[in-house]
Image (spheres, rainbow, N blue to C red):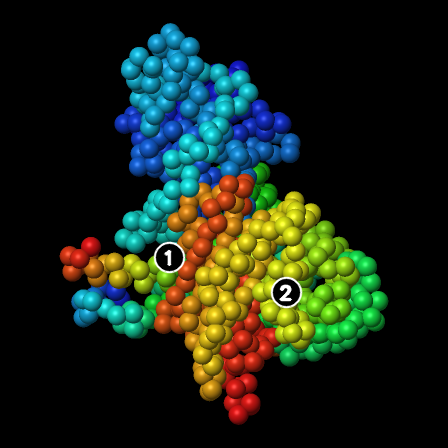
Amino acid sequence: MATVELLRRKPQPSAADIAVITNLCRCGTHVRLRKAITLAAQRMQGRA
Amino acid sequence: MSVALSRRGFLGVTLASSGALWLQPAQAQGGKRIGLIVRIEPDNRVTIGCRNAEIGQGVLTSLPMLIAEELDVRWADVQVEQLPLGVDFTVQPPQWTWGPQGAGGSTSIPDCWGDHRQFGADARALLVAAAAERWGVDASRLSTHEGSVRHTDGRSLRYADLAERAAALPAPAGKAPLKDSSLFRIIGQPQRVVDARDIVTGRARYGLDSAPSDALVAVMQRCPHFDGRVATVDDRAARAVPGVIDVIIIEGPKVTDPLVEHLAAGVAVVARDTWSALRGRAALKVTWHAGPHAQESTASFNAQCERLLAAAGQVVLDQGSVDQAAGVATRRVQARYQLPFANHATMEPQNAYVKLENGRALVIVPTQSPGVIPRRVMNLTGIARENVEVRMTRAGGGFGRRGTVDYVCEAVLIAKATGRAIQIVWTREDDMHHDYFRPAGWHDLKASLDGHRVTGWHHKLASASKHYRRAGQKDEDLWQPELYPDDFPARLVPNLRLEWCSVQSGVPRGSWRAPAHWANAFAVQSFVDEVAHASGQDPLALRLALLGAPQQLPYAQHGGPQFDTGRLAHVLKLAADAVGYGRTRAAGSGVGLACHFTFGGYAAHAIEVSVSKAGELKIERIVCAVDCGRPINPMGLEAQMQGGTIDGLAAALLQEITIKDGAVVERGFADYPLLPLAQTPPLQVLVVHSSATPSGAGEMGIPTVAPALANAIFNACGVRLRRLPVKNQLREAMVARG
């Protein structure tokens, strides 16, 4: 949900924009979260 | 409908209502019955059972891959089911139906590597035999390809058309041959988590989602003090809360009892839903007897460590003479490292569903140890073990916490007292206060050198043993989970002493991911750097010199039987090369290294940091190099190393459980933080493409993070951090330095 809101506001988020997300992750998926958000942004822009 | 077609050949077939077939030929292997866990569906898809519990480590994907490879089916045609606990209690000792089902110690892959491929190969052999019989040809003229049996003349039959006959055939004589690894098409290929879509769309069911609708919800107000008791309860207001059905006092375990069945005394509020139960709990008025540990605090624990380290401990290993080596040393180095208690903090707090009815029990639970549950239920209720059904759900994390089933026992006690099916639910605060915490300890390291050569190594540890209040535990063996005698630098230095001091504490302790490796690798790998700096050596060069020429050393603890120094040196060099070790860096920047052998796997971290004059730490990037033998699912392996690294980083930087008045101080993620996304550095994982027998991957990503970080900080700014977590220490040190 935080990602949807982020991408609504910033369709091409920078690393700093993504870092603003404060959701907690216990299992250490942080690296994949960033990758997934970037990928989602690209797909929504029709770039991937 | 269930049809046993042939007992003689140890075969059984279950014809499910869908018409699908479970191929379950069980083979007599050293007296063990091991059934195949493969079902061929009518549409030729294949359902593969996963016997180990999924706690986020990826076994629902990686274990079926082993079977699918040998069965020779398309991975896209495979669907996976979590198997329930399968134990045959009619034989003595009881036997696993599908093989061992625990999840811990990085054992799932090494346990399943052999037998799962055999399950697949045996099932494939049966399907080939069924086709040979149908066509009246010799099986040697047939081959398989992606779910079909092929004849040399071009004919083919789908597995689905052969399954019923295959399941009725006698089990293959001997073991069907396994594929040559050069033919692998699934093993070694990156595969996404099979239920990833369910997870991200909220359809995956965790323990909290899995209680049947007959469950009442129970929450407990537990005594905050270790081994405390309930003194008085006024439950009038709680019982008046709409939805509250009952209030029950749960006696805690006696101070002399093993701490296996439950952790704490308390008052359970049983209600029709979680909200009502929580409101009822909030309305309770309970007073406590604070118990025998009411004076314990972090300060008293530390004072005990300091006092014990000043006196002689229990020498658990003494090779050569460290005293003699010290006497003739050209240089002696010593340092003290301090590590805190830690909580597992699984994202899904503890919970369980228990129903006791007509001499039977049903338990639905996220757990790492389903196999221990029947005995616990029997002990608490008298229900025979064979009448206890255990179903495992996907668990929202494990990290060792769900290796104990105290929360199941609480639900059993409440179900027994109320006569109702119970779902027990812990809140975050419950979970932070009540855990089997990772033991805290102080490490004194001493080294003797002759020039550049390390001649003596003395590791003296004062800790509260992980084996706290276990049945049959001998005091003289309490050190065993704290120091692993075959760890580096055993046999690599001529004089070695390991010494242990038993700290008395009421804090319940247990296994936290990579148990003693986490603390010991921090102390040892930090100290290697200190020895290198003190003797004018490069830390990488000293590590490589100590590891020496590649050799196989005996390793008697878990993860053995051998420790290959060459494989450890290799991952160390990989990480060092990738981070650009030895490159000139700007002032305030530095790199640190660490390597360690954990439960059969070899890992190294190289961390690059920068430290401002004010002590602001920035982790620029992390490289993790790992050799876990042959990677089964490289994507899963990478995820485990990323997760382990971030877990290790959060533990090193932020996490500490402190004690006051014999109780845990921290309450939740506000004072026991997880690593924020903003502080997560770029992270590169390098996987050695080994053909060695695979180890697991759950724990080796953790132990080397903290020492590599401490070494990097020293390299960047000259401040040596010997106490974890880092928290504000760096800022304080830089301010003090001015």
Q: Where does the image place residue B386, in percent across and percent down from the top left?
A: 55, 35
Q: Is residue B554 above or below residue B469?
A: above
Q: Is residue B359 above or below residue B673?
A: above
Choose between B635 and B370: the one closer to the eye.
B635
Question: Does the image show residue B53?
Answer: no
SS assignment at label 1: loop
Q: Residue furthest top?
A: B136
Q: Which residue is mark 1?
A: B272
Which residue occupies 26% across, 66% down? A2
User: Comparing marks 1 and 2, which lies closer to the viewer?
Assistant: 2
Q: Amino acid at mark 2?
A: Leu
Q: Which residue is mark 2?
A: B542
Which residue occupies 46% across, 51% down? B687
Q: Is residue B547 above or below residue B433?
A: above
Q: Sort mark 2 into few (<14), some (14-19) or many (20+) by Cα contacts within 10 Å.
A: many
- What is the chain letter for disc 1? B
Q: Is residue B4 above or below residue B374?
A: above
Choose between B542 and B249: the one closer to the eye.
B542
- What is the chain letter for disc 2? B
Which residue occupies 83% across, 71% down? B327
Q: Amino acid at mark 1?
A: Arg
The answer to whether residue B477 is left or right of residue B701 is right
SS assignment at label 2: helix
Q: Where does the image place residue B324, in percent across and percent down from the top left?
A: 84, 67
Question: Does the image show residue B2?
Answer: yes
Cα separation, mark 1 vs mark 2, equals: 63 Å
